[in-house]
Amino acid sequence: MRSGAQPVTDCRSGRVPPTQPAEIFLFCACSSRLDPLPWRLHSSYNFGDPSSERKYFRRLAHGLRGVRFFFAPKMPIIPQYKLTYFNAMGRAEPTRMLFAYSGVDYKDERIEKEQWPAMKSKFPFGQLPVLEVDGKTLAQSHAIEKFLARTFGMAGGDDWEAAKIDELVFGVEDLVQKTTAWFKEEDEKKKIEIFRTLVETEIDPFLGRYQNILKENGTGFFIGDKMTLADISVFCLLHYFSCKLLPGHLEKYPELKAFVASVASNPKIKEWIDKRPKTDV
Ligand SMILES: N[C@@H](CCC(=O)N[C@@H](CS)C(=O)NCC(=O)O)C(=O)O
């Protein structure tokens, strides 16, 4: 309002509506918080006096900067993720694949074995992997995978699918547990013998079972008709088998072989496989 205009006293009485665009904006923002700031502002300045008007607009601009806090909760907030593990695929690779497939940025922190003893006590379970989300810490590989799968929409379409995903992930976990003795054995001869038994008694039955589940679902995915944590988990294991542990073994399991080829050819998965640090396990 310029000199000569009506003096403004109490706008809340409804006598004088906000007139400046910035003021209207501020009014809308503040009135939904039941904050009478524009009214108080308006009534405490003398609009005939240029210096008082300047002060008014300075305060208004200051108020507008504050308005961003009003809108902030409505804006999407991108979490900061950090995944800490050793320089290996191991128990972190399904999580890295989830990030890769979803195209979500994260820090892939890799600890050298020599660094670990000094760091161990700083982690909640004294083990890795650990995921940090905006500074909060989550341990246990499967808890991490499930959390991210839910966040990225890869945890199944309903509770039943989510439970069936768990079934397959824990089935993979059981097999991984059974390889521990072979993994730790240092005697070469014994290692070969343990491995032969492992393939016969555990790995082949596992592959047969998982191939049937895949065939029965009939979509090219293990659960439902799109990629879920189950596919990522099985893929990590089978890809490791094909590339490292049992090259050629999937010839006996054509559906599983085709599944591995299909997931590996997904552009985001392929990009990650091509660029990830090359490690033995
Ligand atoms: N149940 C845990 C097991 C984690 C685990 O065994 N981590 C190993 C590496 S694969 C580890 O941190 N080893 C070092 C240690 O235990 O000091 C999970 O799934 O995250």
Image (cartoon, rainbow, N blue to C red):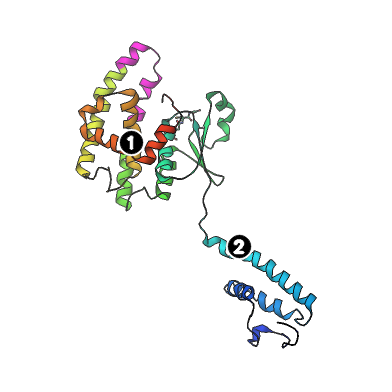
| Circle 1/circle 2 CB separation < 8 Å | no
Which secondary structure, mark 1? helix
Camera-nearest residue between 164 and 270: 270
Q: In the displayed structure, would residue 207 be above or below residue 46? A: above
Disc 2 marks which residue?
Answer: 69
Q: Residue at x 51, y 51 (%)?
A: 78
Specify whether residue 61 is painted magenta: no
Residue 225 drawn at (x, y percent):
27, 48
Q: Quadrant of the N terminus?
A: bottom right
Q: In the displayed structure, would residue 239 be above or below residue 38? A: above
Disc 1 marks which residue?
Answer: 264
Q: Residue at x 26, y 24 (%)?
A: 248
Residue count near mark 2 (Cα–Cα under 10 Å), binned few <14, some 14–19, many ≥20: few
On the picture, is 230 further left or further right than 49? left
Identify the image quadrant of residue 201: top left
Give the residues drawn in magenta, as a range: 175-193
On the picture, is 98 further left or further right than 72? left
* Residue type at numbered disc 2: Phe
Q: Residue at x 31, y 27 (%)?
A: 242
Q: How many marks?
A: 2
Residue count near mark 1 (Cα–Cα under 10 Å), binned few <14, some 14–19, many ≥20: some
* Residue type at numbered disc 1: Ala
Distance from the alpha carbon under mark 1 to that under mark 2: 44 Å
Closer to us: mark 1 or mark 2?
1
Which secondary structure, mark 2? helix
Q: Residue at x 33, y 49 (%)?
A: 156
